Image (tube, rainbow, N blue to C red):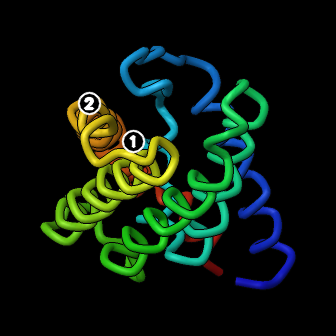
C-alpha cells in the first residue's frame, strides 16, 4: 500500500472509531465510563488492515472520543489501552490473503485484544483510584463491551471480505 493510501486509511479509521465511540454511549456510573461501539470498529480495522492501522486508529480515535465526550481524564490511558488492543488484534489476525471465511485466528485475536482491553482498563482504574478493589466493578462492563464489539464486527468483516473491496485498498 502506498503512503497516500495508508495515510488516508489511517485518517478515515481514526474518524470511524471516534464517531462509533461517540454516537451511542451507554453510561456506566459504577465505572465513570461508558459502553460504546468503538471496539467493533477497532476489531474491523485491525483484522482487515493490520497492526499499524489498528494501533494508530484504535489509540487516537478512542482517545479523541474521550476528549470530545467529556472523559478527558481517560484520554491518555485510552490512547495506550486501545492502541495496544488494535496492535494485538492486528498482529494475530491481519488478513494478508482474501480469505472469505471466519478464521479461528480472528476469534483468538478478538478474545486476546478484548481481554487486554478489560485488563488495561482495570489497571488504569487502579492507578486513577489508588485502589485494587474499586475498579473491579469495571470488569463485567468491559467484558460486555468486548464481546458486543466482536458480535457486531464479525458479520461486517465477513461482508467486506465478500464484497472484494479490499483488493483495491491492498494494492
What residue do we see at 38% from left, 56% from top?
A: 123
Image coordinates for residue 67, horizontal then vertical, percent: 76, 37
Q: Position of residue 93 (x, y in %)?
A: 32, 73
Whether residue 65 is situated above or below residue 14 in the rendered picture? above
Residue at 72 percent across and 37 percent down: it is 72
Front residue of 56 and 158: 56
Q: How many marks?
A: 2
The quadrant where residue 152 appears: top left
Horizontal side of residue 126 vs 169, given as left or right: left
Helix, strand or loop at label 2? It is helix
Q: Which mark is residue 156?
A: 1
What's the residue at 86%, 75% (across, down)? 4
Which of pointers 1 and 2 indicates the residue nearer the eye? Answer: 2
| Residue 29 seen in render | yes
Note whether 22 is above or below 116 in the view shown: above
> Dividing the picture into quarters, in which one does residue 88 lie?
bottom left
Q: Residues within 10 Å of mark 1 (few under 14, many from 20)?
A: some
- The crowd level at tag 2 (other Cα within 10 Å; few <14, some 14-19, many 20+) is some
Left or right for 76, reference 99: right
Q: Which residue is mark 2?
A: 137
Kindly state the secondary structure of the residue where label 1 is placed. helix
Quick one: label 1 or label 2, which is nearer the N terminus? 2
Query: Marks 1 and 2, Cα distance to the nearest angstrom?
Result: 30 Å
Amino acid at each position: 500500500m502506498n503512503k497516500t493510501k495508508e495515510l488516508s486509511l489511517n485518517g478515515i479509521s481514526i474518524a470511524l472509531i471516534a464517531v462509533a465511540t461517540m454516537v451511542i454511549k451507554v453510561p456506566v456510573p459504577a465505572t465513570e465510563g461508558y459502553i460504546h461501539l468503538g471496539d467493533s470498529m477497532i476489531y474491523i480495522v485491525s483484522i482487515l488492515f493490520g497492526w499499524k492501522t489498528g494501533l494508530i486508529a484504535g489509540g487516537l480515535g478512542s482517545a479523541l472520543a474521550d476528549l470530545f465526550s467529556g472523559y478527558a481524564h481517560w484520554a491518555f490511558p485510552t490512547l495506550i489501552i486501545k492502541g495496544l488492543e488494535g496492535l494485538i488484534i492486528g498482529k494475530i489476525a491481519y488478513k494478508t490473503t482474501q480469505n472469505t471465511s471466519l478464521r479461528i485466528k480472528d476469534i483468538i485475536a478478538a478474545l486476546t485484544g478484548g481481554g487486554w482491553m478489560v485488563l488495561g482498563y482495570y489497571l488504569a482504574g487502579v492507578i486513577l483510584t489508588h485502589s485494587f478493589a474499586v475498579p473491579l466493578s469495571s470488569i463485567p462492563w468491559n467484558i460486555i463491551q468486548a464481546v458486543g464489539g466482536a458480535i457486531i464486527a464479525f458479520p461486517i468483516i465477513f461482508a467486506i471480505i465478500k464484497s472484494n473491496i479490499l483488493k483495491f485498498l491492498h494494492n
